[in-house]
Amino acid sequence: MSADLRYENVTADQRDLAIMAEKYFAGVVADPLGGADLGWFSVGTDPELGGVGGTTVDLAILIESAGATRAVSCLGESALLALPLLAGALQSDVRQRLLDGAVSVATPAISPWQAAQSISAEGQILTGSFVVLGVEAPELLLVPVRTRDGERVVLIDAADGTVTTEALPSSDVTRHLLRIRLDGTGAGAIVGRALGADLFAEYMARRASVVALDAVGAARAALDRTLKYAAVRTQFGQPIGSFQAYKHRCANAFIELKLAQSVAFGAARVAGTVRGSLLGLAAGRCATANATFICGEAVQLHGGIGYTWEAGIHAFLKRARMDEIIGRGCARARATLMELDDLGSDIGPAS
């Protein structure tokens, strides 16, 4: 990939990590636990909790690289969502399996408020259904539940007999869409849980950050392919990239990419803070929308071949659009974003 399209606000070591990660994911696009052998699922987790340390920006680089290669990866759902969200509420063996990248994770492809409405919680018995997007056969399910005690997020063993999975057709040809049904799933299937005020808002912000980074990766790869195509495809005896109108559209896509990268990586940099929640929700709306626009431009700027399966550009567009649908959330997510934005100067600048 062209180095100048990558997010620039990183160290030299992080840039090397980005280049290496993209090459790695390109070879394991169908492995949802790709990177486990390199310890990537524990990046960003404090060594005192069993992680390898590093920053959330390091983790963001890995998630973005998976998006750029259209990999089927649950790295973001595991390391940026499940592990920090459940924190010390996990059984020790389950936490270690997550840190080792030994178990795949999936979570509803809708906002937590919407997901909770589709699940009935009677005591510790859960019944309902929802859809997930990602791996073909998730082993753990991160599920938002609303109880009398408040907002709760539980981690469910998908191998429990009360959990069934049905494959669904999907416009996103790079990942799997599944319908999960819980039929009286009890406490025995729950391997971790968290309860707290505004838990769904934190969940949504982190989930939005994951899909924003994935979408930004897809957009970067699509634009990179477009620029390379513009240099070799000729019309009227000239490379099409030399035409002014073509240049303008590529320049606009480049600007949108840089804006998307800024908010997506910015959200990851301060994840877990009030500012992180604000930027995470913003990234879910803005960065993913920018990515969809960029991938749409990539399809059109490839001309007729851009609409063919052989070119593969359509896969980036469909992936980015699915990320946008998830990242935008719902009316409650928008209201939460506005509430956080109203805090204004109380949030303060990023450190």
Image: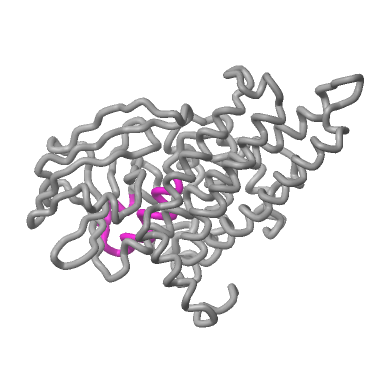
The segment highlighted magenta reads 75-96
- Relative to residue 316, is residue 168 drawn left or right? left
Front residue of 1 and 34: 1
Residue shown at 53%/61% (left/top)?
Answer: 267
Residue 337 showing in the rendered view: yes
Q: Residue furthest right?
A: 237
Question: Is 91 contained in the magenta span?
Answer: yes
Magenta stretch prevailing secondary structure = helix
Residue 56, percent from left and from top:
52, 59
Picture quarter containing residue 240?
Answer: top right
- Where 126 falls versus 276 (above or below)? above
Q: How is the image coloured?
A: one colour
Front residue of 2 and 226: 226
Question: Is 23 contained in the magenta span?
Answer: no
Quarter of the image with the C terminus in it: bottom right
Front residue of 85 and 304: 304
Residue shown at 90%/24% (left/top)?
Answer: 238
Residue shown at 55%/48% (left/top)?
Answer: 289
Residue 243, percent from left and from top:
86, 33
Residue 260, percent from left and from top:
61, 53
Residue shown at 66%/36% (left/top)?
Answer: 297
